[in-house]
Structure formats: C-alpha cells, structure tokens
Image (tube, rainbow, N blue to C red):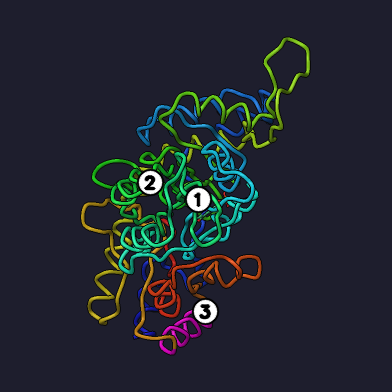
Amino acid sequence: MFDSFIQLVREIYHTEEFIPLHEPRFVGNEKQYLLDVVDSTYVSSVGPYVDQFEAKIAEYCGVKRAVATVNGTAALHMALLLAGVKPGEQVITQAVSFVATANAITYCGAEPVFVDVECNRLGLSPLALGEFLAEFAEFRDGAVWNKLNGKRIAACLPMHTFGHPCDIEAILQICDLYQLPVIEDAAEALGSTWHGKHCGSFGLLGALSFNGNKIITTGGGGMILTNDEKLAQQAKHLTTTAKIAHPWQFIHDQLGFNYRLPNLNAALGLAQLEQLPAFLENKRALAQRYINWARQKHVEILVEPFGAHSNYWLNALLFKDKVECDLFLGASNHNGIMTRPLWELLCNLPMYKHCQTDGLQNSHAVVARLVNIPSSVVQ
Ligand SMILES: *Cc1c(COP(=O)(O)O)cnc(C)c1O
C-alpha cells in the first residue's frame, strides 16, 4: 500500500525529486503586476492593488467588505477585537487547528476554550458546542457567563479545516440562541462554500490567509471579511494605526495596529486570485485521484461533506491506528515525499495546557490517525 502511494504521487507530479506538501504556483500575471508596482514606487502600505485586491476578494466571497491585513493571524486578531473580545474573557474554539487560531484569542488577553470537532469534517461540532453551552453557559445581563469560573464567554471561533466547511449554519443557530458572535477562521477555505455560500461570509466576521502554503498566496497576507459596513470601517481604521485622515497632521484616536498589507503583496494576490478558479478545478481532480486510490486500498480519506463544495486545499488520509500512521509517515518522508501528521492538539501545547476543554473525544481519536499528503496544484 505504501509503495503504491509513493508511485501514485510520483506519477501525479511526474518527478523523482522531493515533493513538498504544498507549494505556490505562479503562472499568471504575477511578474507583470509586481514590475508595475516597483515602477510605480508604491511598494508599501498604500496603493491601487490593495484596493483592487480587497474589492475582488469581497466580490468573490460574496461579502460587502474585505479588509486586507499583513497576515491571517492579524486578520483573526482584529476580527476578535472587533467582535468585542476583551481581556479575561473566553472564546470557544477547536483544539484541531493551527496555533494561530488560539494565539489570536490570547492576543486579545482572552483565553480559548477547546470544544470537540466532528470526525468526518474536523470542524467545530455543533453537537459538542450545544452540550458545552448547555452545561456551562449562563445567560445573564445580555451576556454569556461560564458557570465554572465566572468568566464571560465572548465569542465562538470555528475553523474550516483543510478547506472543508464546518457545519457553520448549525453553529450559528446555537450561537444565536446565546447571542454569541461567530468569527470564522476561514484561513484554509478560500474557494470553499457551504450550501452555495462562501466560507467566512456566515459569521459576524471571517478571516482568510494568503500565507505561502495556502491555496493562493501574497507571500504573507490575510483578509477580514464582513457584511457589516461599520465593522469594516473600524477594521480598516484599526489596522492602519488608527490614524485620522488629515492632509498633514498625525492624529491617532486610539491604540491602532500596523497590520496593513503592502501594495507589493496585494499585486501578487490579485494575479493569484485570477488563477483561483483553475487552481480549484485542478485540486478537485487531484483529490479525485487520491480518493480513487484510497477506495482501492481501503484507506479512509477526507472528502467534502454533503452540501459543501470544498477547495480541497490539503488532502488527508486517516489510517486505522497510530502504528500504521507512523509507518506511513516514515515510508513517505524517507522516500522524498513530504507528508505530515495533524497539528498537535492545541490543548497539549504548553501555553494552552491549562485551558478548559470538553474532553475532545473525536479530536484525540483523529490526531493519532491523520496524515496530510502532497496537495499542490498539479502542473
Ligand atoms: C494559515 C492559518 C492561519 C494563519 O494565517 P497566517 O497568514 O499564516 O498568519 C490561521 N488559522 C489557520 C487554521 C491557518 O491554517
């Protein structure tokens, strides 16, 4: 089974050299737009490409406004601040995620609470969320309080894992009952939809990432998505040092952040976005090849949930146990094919060890069995 996998991946990427997990592809207008930026001298934090990139992403994702940021983590940090997350409060999220999800909560002075994921799509489980809130949440004075420690539960931050939409509508329904704002970590989900609507456009705010390993890249970059015009204005203000527009004076009316996306990066992003439809088709065909192989070999593989259209950013195999999983990781990496286990559960990291969890039954089960396999766009 291992040999046939190695053979398949070498056949797909037709190379005998090292095959990475996910590498960027620049086959469009990247060089042209970058040269244009250099010639214009507007390489830094203002320029026409930033505005264009924001407008095109907003249109593509079906939201009223998109605000560019220096990376996805900064977008998450801003989204949480704008949703009203304050020091000493708690935010419900999942332990199955990249560390940035929890870090963004910590940057607000708040702490994450880790609730379980659904095993078939690895997004926050509405069932687990409902049970957690039923047990610990107390609704009082228009806010949700944790009966365990008296802290305010300020928001819910689900993540669309590997580009597979979580059950966001069910999550929203539950959070609406408690008047909890939902912020979507859609860093991995550009191009993914749930019931025809784009990931990151359901909640009060959403965050995208354009890091080098994501489906399109700006080198580094991120985007805040929202349908709330006022929040968008605040997002722009806060991410641009909270400077009041004035012909010459430097007045900043609150503690702002320098979270701007440079024009140089936005130019790259615009060229990449033009290729997104082709990338999506390419990745869907790639996923189908992996799915066919996995069915033949009786290996479990993550597929898009019914009702979703996933971007298939990163494909994932699920082995029967940790032993088989480790053997596969060893064999593939030894043969120059990059494969990686799931992130360490966030609740196991030193800075999040003390955080409240709901037991995380599915999260623990999946972390021992999952391997991500090469998923770059095929040339
Ligand atoms: C990539 C990623 C981020 C952060 O994005 P950066 O642009 O690298 O800061 C956040 N959350 C998840 C789930 C991610 O995969």
Foreground disc of the pair 3, 2? 2
Kindly identify which residue carries mark 2: 178
- Camera-side residue of 156 and 77: 156
Cα gap from disc 2 to disc 1, whole angstroms: 10 Å
Taking 185 as reference, is 78 left or right?
A: right
Foreground disc of the pair 3, 1? 1
Taking 338 as reference, is 274 left or right?
A: left
**Mark 3 crowdedness (10 Å alpha carbons): few <14, some 14-19, many ≥20:** some
Give the numbered dot on residue 153. 1
Which amino acid type is marked by label 2?
Tyr
Whether pointer 2 and pointer 1 mark residues with C-beta atoms closer than 8 Å, the reply is yes
Bounds of the magenta segment: 323-334
Kindly identify which residue carries mark 3: 333
Position of residue 242 relative to residue 375, above or below, is above
Residue 263, by quadrant, is top right
- Camera-side residue of 296 and 252: 252
Q: Can residue 37 be seen in this view?
A: yes
Whether pointer 3 and pointer 2 mark residues with C-beta atoms closer than 8 Å, the reply is no
